[in-house]
Image: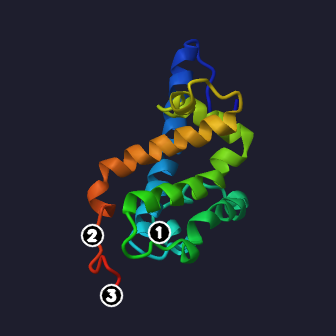
Amino acid sequence: MGSLRRTRDKSSTIDAITVHLNRWYYSGIRELAQSAIDACRGQEITIERAIHRGHFHGVPYAHRKSAMASFVPYIDTESRERPQGTNPREYLTEWLDETIDGHEFVLYTYKAKLVTVATDNADAYEEEYGEPSIKPEVTAYWAMRADVWEELDRREDEWEIEDPDPEGK
């Protein structure tokens, strides 16, 4: 069983796994929200900055290359830089839709299934369309979108910025 010890009380083991799963997932959500804020503010997003923030903390060395490859959607900000005069909420919506669509939590079925267990918004797709999704990747996409927006709304003062020259002069 690896690092999990066999206990008579299986519910405590399940609780411990759930706690770790939630930490893993919401750590990714907070990082995604921070990357969105950085992009909205026009700050360059680099792997070095992600490493400094601890994005790859706990990732075994053998898996770091693939973990860094999954970070590439965050780095491509040059073509998605927020133009002056653009509504920050509209920009973030587009940025998140593009980024989450290519995120490893959505691309890989087993990670998407983990997302559906860890998130508090597993019903986000159903709320939007009136029926549940049969695909865990779709459920994970909508759950992540809702979770990141909850984080962004808590941190609205960091990204809801006024353009210094709204007319672009």
Q: Where residue 73 appears, x then y in whole percent?
A: 62, 64
Q: Is residue 118 visible to the viewer in this orientation of the structure?
A: yes
Q: Label 3: state its secondary structure.
A: loop
The residue at 57%/60% (across/down) is 56
Name the residue carrying label 1.
Answer: 52
Q: Residue furthest front?
A: 167
Q: Earlier in the sequence, mark 2 or mark 3?
A: 2
Q: Where residue 87 appears, x then y in whole percent?
A: 38, 63
Which label was assigned to residue 162?
A: 2
Badge 3 amino acid: Lys
Q: Residues within 10 Å of mark 2 (few under 14, many from 20)?
A: few
Circle 3 or circle 1, nearest the eye: 3
**Quadrant of the image containing the C terminus:** bottom left
Name the residue carrying label 3.
Answer: 169
- 95 and 22: which is toward the camera: 95
- 137 and 161: which is toward the camera: 161
**Quadrant of the image containing the N terminus:** top right
The residue at 51%/20% (across/down) is 12
Circle 2 or circle 1, nearest the eye: 2
